[in-house]
Image: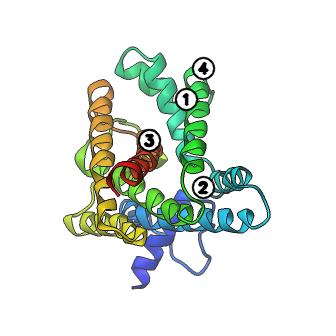
Amino acid sequence: MKREIDIFFTGLSFFTRVPFPKWAQFKKEYQHEAIKYFPISGAIIGGLAGLTFYLANLVFPFNLSIMLSMGFTVFFTGALHEDGFMDVCDGFGGGWNRERILEIMKDSLIGAFGVTGIVFLVLTKFFCQYSIAATQLPLILIAAHSVSRMFAASLVNSHQYARTDNSKAKDYSQKLSAKNLIFTIVTGILPLTLLGNLKFFLILIPVFLCKILLGRYYKKWIGGFTGDCIGATQQVCEIVFYLSYMIIINQVL
């Protein structure tokens, strides 16, 4: 049990700004298992974002409450996945071969593709959340952050790591055992039960297809994935989750 707690905080301290507890034990070999707690970290992030929205919505207008919730999410995660999304936009937008794409993605500077992509991403997130009822949004945030991270984490088992150098993300990008993969899937899907209708499990289909298409795209151009690809996949899958939810609300229920 102590070992699992240490692994959990190893992951949480990487995925968010939560500091690694002094009483916990850090081991390098724990890093490759920490990705299994990606969905649970997502549920925590979504829960806190939902709480931020709920409290803000008590005193502020709906649209401002959404912006405050989104701002909290960026602060709490250190914009880890947004940064990955921008790097992917710059790399795949400006690169013409595998080596050049990987080189651009590693560059700390932000290019036109990254800026354009992040503006579109933030606006799409805002208008998606603005289209969801205030009473449902906190629960939607929990499920969306969890499910999107579950599918992003599955990249480590379905694809090879593309870089040959020893980057920090590589330690968190090793293939999971069958047991840990099942744990990741179950903990990623479980928050969907909060939505109160089994039909919302249909959301998994388009989000899964999104992950498949992104994975194929990464493999075609760079032969696999990087840490930035995991972040970009999480961000895009999160948006597909919101869009799928709205389709089900408007067309199915």
Which mark sits nearer the N-terminus, 3 or 2? 2
Q: Mark 1, mark 2: which one is toward the viewer?
A: 1
Horizontal side of 169 relative to 114 (left or right) equals: left
**x%, y% of residue 130?**
60, 49
Amino acid residing under circle 1:
Gly
Amino acid residing under circle 2:
Thr
- Residue that numbered label 4 is attached to: 112
Distance from Cα at disc 1 to Cα at disc 2: 19 Å
Residue positioned 46% across, 20% down in the render: 93
- Residue that numbered label 2 is attached to: 77
Amino acid residing under circle 4:
Ala
Can residue 11 be seen in this snapshot? no
Distance from Cα at disc 3 to Cα at disc 4: 19 Å
In the picture, residue 210 is in which quadrant?
top left
Horizontal side of 113 relative to 201 (left or right) equals: right
Point out the residue furthest to the right here. 59
